Amino acid sequence: MKLFDVYPLYEVTPVRAKDVYVYDDQGVEYLDLYGGHAVISIGHAHPHYVASLSDQLDKIGFYSNAIQNPLQLQLADAIGDQSCLHSYALFLCSSGAEAIENALKLASFHTQRKKVLAFHKSFHGRTSAAVAVTDNKAITAPLNAQHEVDFIAFNDLEALKKALASKTYCAVIFEAIQGVGGLDQPDEAFVLALEEQCNATGTCLIADEVQAGFSRTGTFFAYQHYPIQPHIITMAKGMGNGFPIGGILVHPNIEAQQGMLGTTFGGNHLACRASLAVLDILQKDRLQEHAKHMESYFREKAEHLSAIKKVKGRGLMLGIEFDFEVGALRKSLIYDHYIFTGGSSHKKLIRILPPLTVQKHHIDYFFSALEKALEQNTQTA
Ligand SMILES: Cc1ncc(COP(=O)(O)O)c(C=O)c1O
């Protein structure tokens, strides 16, 4: 049977990985500055993570949400401790898009409204409501287009006020740092107004932290850069370091009702152990602070390369902007210099989303390779 051909693939076949390196079937070592779409948080095959998962597999890997699972409570406490959101409640699922679906559904149950306000260049996933609140018509099927969604620009306060004044929106959903869209961030004044307008109009504020959450940006959640309290926070990618786990955190003002949300796989024993292992290492190795230090170092190095127009983002969720399209440059980085980087819908931007364990010498290696690749790029252009 062939595979349903939906992914444009690079000609690389990884067979093992360790920390920030990935090794292919020919034994070639690649520096992973992409973390498989921002998923690898504590490094590939971290010994504590591997030991935790193996130990859990030996005990019980899975049982459904019909029984007591103390690991879920342990995970809720650990997330509460590291995010300082002790009063929020945790609901677990298995992916980013599923977290978004549940967040939107919950906002709709809570407000009994159905419209959603989202932002230009947003990306929230590919399932029904998640893709409808994503600003990309090319991946929205007619089935998804039935959702009632309006898009406005970041920092357009007038449009925000006008929309929410109608009191017909169940939620506003935003990324504090846009991932797929190209690392744009709203101004602080706008983020504060978002919270204020949502509270004034009974609209839920959903912070999508699927990509930015779990310490990637130097705070536990990227929105925590601002003094706001969203009603629902979505998370996934870095949460499991590769084990499929996602979840939402729910503000205490939103009441749970039995049966309103549910899933078979979400919150299973293995998934909880994976995420607990991630949280252990984030804390023990102070990876949140480390992400900030690495950002400063990265920005310093970037200043020496005149081809770079701008460095966007925060912590280890960064984008390097050029004044030309970066497709060929990224190909050269992977095939000539053995470095994985990411693209985005902004064609002139390279995304850098390494494991949070990345060190200065990896960044040095990247910049010297980038310099060489840029020279090659100018010669072939
Ligand atoms: C901000 C954001 N939200 C949601 C998603 C969807 O997550 P998943 O691919 O796990 O469904 C993504 C994926 O890239 C994302 O970046």
Image (cartoon, rainbow, N blue to C red):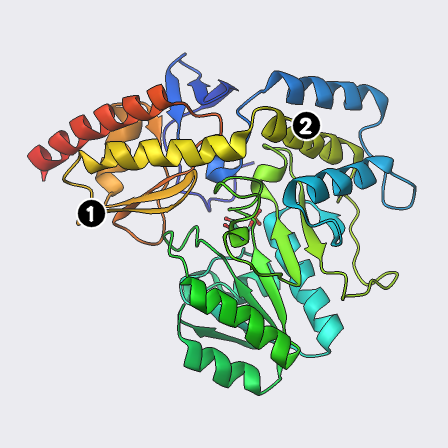
- Mark number for residue 264? none
Label 2 – label 1 distance at C-alpha: 38 Å
Q: Quadrant of the N terminus?
A: top right
Q: In the image, is residue 117 above or below residue 232?
A: below
Q: In the image, is residue 276 above or below residue 23?
A: below
Is 31 situated left or right of 326 in this image? right
Q: Quadrant of the C terminus?
A: top left
Q: How many marks?
A: 2
Residue 292: % across, % down: 43, 36
Which residue has dot 2 on it? 277
Is 214 situated left or right of 103 in this image? left
Question: Mark 2: which amino acid?
Answer: Ala
Q: Nearer the viewer, residue 163 or 339?
A: 163
Residue at horizontal 14 percent and vertical 39 percent from the top: 306
Q: In the image, is residue 200 above or below residue 17?
A: below
Which residue has dot 1 on it? 309
Q: Nearer the viewer, residue 223 or 163?
A: 223
Label 2 CA crowd tier, 10 Å (few <14, some 14–19, many 20+):
many
Residue at horizontal 44 percent and vertical 80 percent from the top: 159
* Mark with earlier residue (2, 1): 2
Residue at horizontal 48 percent and vertical 43 percent from the top: 217
Residue at horizontal 43 percent and vertical 25 percent from the top: 358
Residue 378: % across, % down: 9, 36
Residue 37: % across, % down: 47, 40
